[in-house]
Amino acid sequence: MQAVAQLAVDEALRAGADYADARVQRLSLEELAMRDGSLVGADAPESFGLGVRVLKNGAWGFAAAPGNHKDLADVAPGLARRSVKAARDLGRLRRTPVELVPQEGQVGEWYTPVEEDPFQVSLEEKLGLMRQADESMRGRDEIVSRVVNLSLRREEQWQASSDGARLHQVLVRTGAGLAAKASAHGVVERRSYPASFSGNQISGGFEVVRAMDLPGNGGRMRDEAADLCSAPLCPEGVRTLILGGSQLCLQIHESVGHPTELDRVLGHEMDLAGASFATRNHLRTLDYGSSCVNLQADSTLAGGLDTRGWDDDCVPSGSWPIVQAGVFKGYQTNREVASAVDEDKSRGCSRAESWYDPPIVRITNLSLQPGNMSFDDMLADTEDGAIFADSVRTWSIDQRRVNFQFTCEVAREIQGGRLGRLLRRPTYQGNTTSFWGSCDAICSPEHFHLWGIATCGKGNPMQVAEMTHGAAPSRFREIQFIQ
Amino acid sequence: MTLLSADHALEVCQALVDASPADETEVTLQSEEDRFARFSPEGPSQNADRERHWLSIRARLHTEAGWKEARATVGTLDEDDARAALGRAMALAGAAAPDPDRLPLAGAVEIPGSAPHRPTQDHSFREKAEWIEAAMSRCAQAELAPAGLARTTVYTRTLINSAGRVAEGALSRAHFSLTASPTDGSGDAGVAEQTHCDVTRIDVDEVISRAVDRGTRGRNPKPIPAQEYTVVLEPLAVSSLMLFLSYVGLGAEELHLKASPLVGRIGERIFPEDLQLYDDAGHVDHPGWRFDGEGTPRSRVALISDGAFGLPVTDARWARTLDLPDTGHSAPQPNSKGPAPENLVLAAGNESMEQLISGVDNGLLISQFHYTNLMEPRDMILTGMTRGGTFQIQGGKVTDSVCNLRFTQSLVEALKQVTGIGRRQEIVGALFDGEIVCPALRLDGFRFTSTTEI
């Protein structure tokens, strides 16, 4: 397949391209979903194809088609010519030519470290584990639905570029989760473990699922979902908020990850996803958060869903600060946009959903660095009436990534330095820099966990990408709650 | 050319049904040709000339305790790949527990066939470049930064099962959108879009004019307090709200799980009588697939009529469970998602946009909502932000541009407060999946809960 990628690049150059890259990708998934003990989803999709991208006279062209090891070599020349034609047909409208920052041709291989190949674990064992998880949620009349998900993904990619890149990568991620939905007193509530929307995904093998202990947590989710139906609504007003890691994952993603994608800042995403308040004049000057807020981008992070050897521009992975001691320090870039902030190297954030899609700038792994407080000490240090909330229920943020409103699955009122009564539908709102500026404490490394986002949508037509956000519970002062 | 002829697609599917060792087999082949050009302030920024297939095999094994079933999908038409997929489906089905609620596959049906719309299929990058050039030119004259999408896509889908069911059809879609932002950052962008199954029906000039008008008038917005307002929602804004009824809420499964606005409300007259919502895959300007994920013909379903919610949409399984007719709204099975409407049509009223606006003494004209999401399923409480042009209406006239606001509002309660329905329907989408055919609406008492600076 490496030869096919190279063939596509060579054919594109022969057709007149000034630059070309090609990705052959084979994507295999296994998606299992169990509801109330029955297997309601069992799919094993596979996709195999070639995407060819060129620059001609400063304009992009891209073409893609499916195939496999038998016929992609036959498909490649035609795709190369089509991509050059697309660039030619549209290129006359470019006001300024696309220029890529330099990148030495990379040659190498990269494999996700896997202890236990998830595709080699027997179906019987996987389904047995799911049944145990399902069983653990039985036992309360209020429960109207028990769902267990298990998801495996293996992405094998061969890349070549006219800069001399020849890359082979195999990325494996594994995920699982459970959710109990309760209905009582005219109220519907859901609790999910370890995270909402099909659980958590981590780069690695089946050891990821074993470590989750789904059966050991189903009973707690069942009881919390049922009890939430008779719990009071989280009250309105201004209060201290402690966010758990799985909700912080979304907070990082929406209010730091997306606004620091440089293509958004430059207007490339204005047609659908929107722009960003974090414009270039704010770089290295804006107080994005309080001094305890450090957010590090890292596409080398062990377990990260965007942990790989190279991005789809064939740029090696790396680590750099986005927010350091509260100050806005960096963007996520690709080879096309990096020069807009006077950087001579891309940060390596170019990714496509699959061979079918042209790459765009994507959020990489982006984590809130841990602080030094234990969770118990944080609770003990927090006044009565403060709220602990976790697990995403719903979210919304404006197109500039300033005004957000998030609702969690569960909250508990803090009383006497401990977690107290359950509160349902905690909904908090704010604006991005004020929110991060109100952060005054972050829990220590032993409370730091990785939370995967497997369905980040961006682009137009929309593409899905995966990335991870690490976080430990953190405290925010004077947060507005609404009902 | 990727799309297969109907005969060729049937042949591919039938060969797999014949080769399957399963007790029952269903094969679906969907093919897609897509050509898009995206543009941003510097011109065309991204494009693709691409094609793909999904060849999906559903294998079913019968046991005394019920059916065991699973699915595997492959993205090529290679015979070895297809047989490997059949093997994966068989392995998954073999490991599944029997489900006594699963029904045998259903047999032959009559479904009208359809073919891709040739001018839409053949629409070239050069033609898209003409659309984009016109948008860039008009935006430059108005000191606005353009961004948008020109796209044409054609799909074919064929489904065959071992019980004798054969269904096939095609869809075509053309789309042009423009977001026009003040280059000096003095306000939010103006937004407009059109979608149609016939590329020749896309009125590029109208899209450009509307976006440029909104972008120009949206400069220097003034802040207003977050409170309840009477609002006139243009179709793009209506879509952000109404499409949630296709994501969640109007399917039989959600009703059964008591996570639906239908709970306790079916047949109760709570909405204005002229508010009529249908699911209609046969809409002449925006047709959907005429058969569902199991090959059952899609019925036209009245979801809101005579001021009341109607019955939910169903699939074979939920129709039997709830003793309702099968309306043909199944996802491909097996699936963790229940039946859902995919082709919403909100009936037109009789008011022009001017009449809708003239009926507002103090309110807002809203072009679009951004990132709307669901907070609560029973009352369909939604939150989202205004975008793409928000204007004050005073004394029945549109006056100032205003800063964007966040709403937090029950959709059920909002629809009770509809006081006017536009006479012109548009085909519009939102940030998430799907499109709806809908007119503008005027609603009283729409609740806003926070504001922004632009």
Image: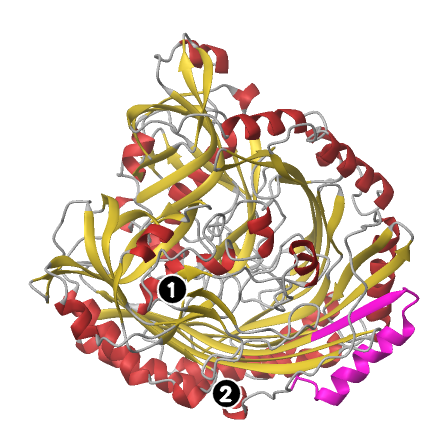
Q: Amino acid at mark 2?
A: Thr
Q: Is residue B98 above or below residue B11?
A: above
Up the image or down, A242 lies above or below B205; here it is: above
Q: Is residue B381 in view?
A: yes
Amino acid type indicated by mark 1 = Ser
Residue A26 located left or right of residue A353: right
Q: Position of residue A341 (x, y in %)?
A: 34, 52
Magenta segment boundaries in residue numbering? B1-29
* Coloring scheme used: secondary structure
Which percent across, then down, holds residue B176? 39, 77
Q: Report whether mark 1 lies on the same chain as mark 2.
A: yes
* A306 left or right, relative to A421: right
Magenta stretch: includes residue B178 = no
Instruction: Residue under label 2, please give it.
Output: B120
Q: Earlier in the sequence, mark 1 or mark 2?
A: 2
SS at circle 2: helix
Q: Position of residue B404 (x, y in %)?
A: 23, 53
In the image, B270 versus A250, the foreground residue is: B270
> Do the residues under discs 1 and 2 have CB atoms within 8 angstroms?
no
Residue ID at (29%, 50%): A280
**Is B245 in front, or is A172?**
B245
What residue is at 21 percent from the left and 64 percent from the top? Answer: B183
Above or below for A302 versus A28: above
Q: Residue furthest left?
A: B395
Residue A471 visible somewhere in the drawing:
no
| Residue B256 screen position, x and y as percent | 59, 48
Camera-side residue of A149 and A260: A149
Mark 1 = which residue? Answer: B239
Chain to which mark 2 belongs: B
Q: Quick one: SS at disc 1?
A: helix
